[in-house]
């Protein structure tokens, strides 16, 4: 790993600040009374002015903070593998994760920023502007949540024998494959939650398991991955050999987050 513990300690509060600032830019558009203007990208995923405002702010701030570390953002992802394969570390950004939740105005969207080192996430921040919560974590430092009551360490928790297993799933993407997975838990409850908050609920011990059956992109999972693992959970991807975040294909396969 290139990144030193001192760098992680220095950058983590800086990335929290950048994420919160991006959240303010998003809320400035979210709170406008008029309807949200939505465009469709080439893959038919939605794009709003808030995605772009957050992207531009984050890119500017990261280039100031670490000018020598490249950035891969959802809104600037057309960087060829011939270039990316030489990156020893890079920032991985989803400026507005949960654009569909943003459009629905249900508040369950986030700003995601992760640092990838040698193909694995080592630092991550997930900020939920409407909820007023900022989750963060880094290798060797633990995982945290900050809200109006302050900041505290969080820890993932395994279900006890006989306890109802609490699972979280996607709010906007129905996954029929989850049904046979749930069948292994005689006592369970499944809660639908938007965006990368599903990682955070496992990291916080509110949920036990997050099974994902269906496509996600690297920027959807990088920050949540390190927050979950820093809290003591594991993130296991199907069919991934070698570093999970240093590969040509930006699309993830199925994965499960649990202790």
Image (cartoon, rainbow, N blue to C red):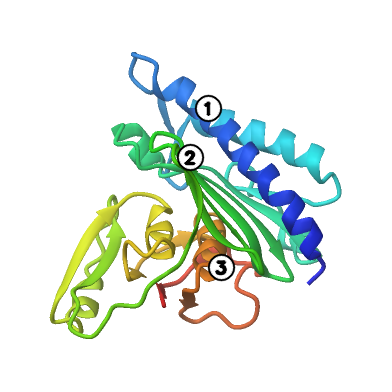
Q: Position of residue 55 (x, y in %)?
A: 61, 36
Residue 91 is left or right of residue 64, and the answer is: left
Q: Nearer the viewer, residue 12 or 196?
A: 12
Camera-nearest label, 3 or 2: 3
Q: Which residue is mark 1?
A: 24
Q: Residue at x 50, y 26 (%)?
A: 49
Counting other residues with Cα less than 10 Å from the Cα at mark 2, is it few (<14), some (14-19), or many (20 or more)? few
Which comes sooner in the sequence, label 2 or label 1?
1
Q: Is residue 78 visible?
A: no
Q: Which residue is mark 3?
A: 230
Counting other residues with Cα less than 10 Å from the Cα at mark 3, is it few (<14), some (14-19), or many (20 or more)? many
Counting other residues with Cα less than 10 Å from the Cα at mark 1, is it few (<14), some (14-19), or many (20 or more)? some
Classify residue 190 by image quadrant.
bottom left
Rounded to the nearest angstrom, the CA distance separating label 3 from label 2 is 34 Å
Camera-nearest label, 2 or 1: 1
Rounded to the nearest angstrom, the CA distance separating label 2 from label 1 is 24 Å
């Amino acid at each position: 790993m290139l990144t030193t513990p001192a760098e992680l300690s220095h950058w983590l509060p800086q990335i929290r600040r950048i994420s919160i600032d991006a959240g303010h830019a998003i809320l400035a558009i979210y709170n406008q009374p008029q309807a949200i203007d939505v465009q469709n990208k080439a893959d038919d995923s939605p794009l709003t002015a808030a995605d772009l405002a957050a992207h531009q702010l984050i890119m500017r701030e990261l280039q100031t903070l670490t000018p020598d570390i490249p950035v891969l953002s959802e809104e600037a992802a057309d960087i060829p593998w011939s270039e990316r394969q030489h990156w020893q570390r890079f920032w991985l950004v989803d400026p507005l994760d949960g654009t569909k939740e943003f459009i629905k105005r249900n508040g369950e969207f986030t700003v995601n920023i992760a640092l990838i080192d040698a193909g694995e996430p080592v630092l991550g921040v997930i900020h939920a502007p409407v909820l007023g919560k900022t989750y963060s974590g880094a290798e060797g430092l633990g995982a945290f949540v900050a809200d109006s009551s302050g900041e505290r360490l969080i820890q993932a928790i395994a279900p006890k024998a006989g306890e109802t297993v609490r699972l979280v799933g996607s709010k906007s993407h129905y996954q029929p494959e989850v049904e046979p997975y749930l069948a292994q838990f005689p006592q369970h409850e499944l809660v639908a939650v938007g965006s990368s908050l599903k990682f955070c609920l496992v990291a916080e011990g509110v949920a036990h398991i997050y099974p994902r059956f269906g496509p996600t992109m690297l920027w959807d999972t990088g920050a949540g991955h390190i927050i979950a693992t820093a809290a003591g959970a594991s993130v296991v991807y199907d069919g991934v050999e070698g570093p999970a975040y240093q590969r040509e294909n930006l699309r993830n396969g199925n994965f499960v987050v649990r202790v």
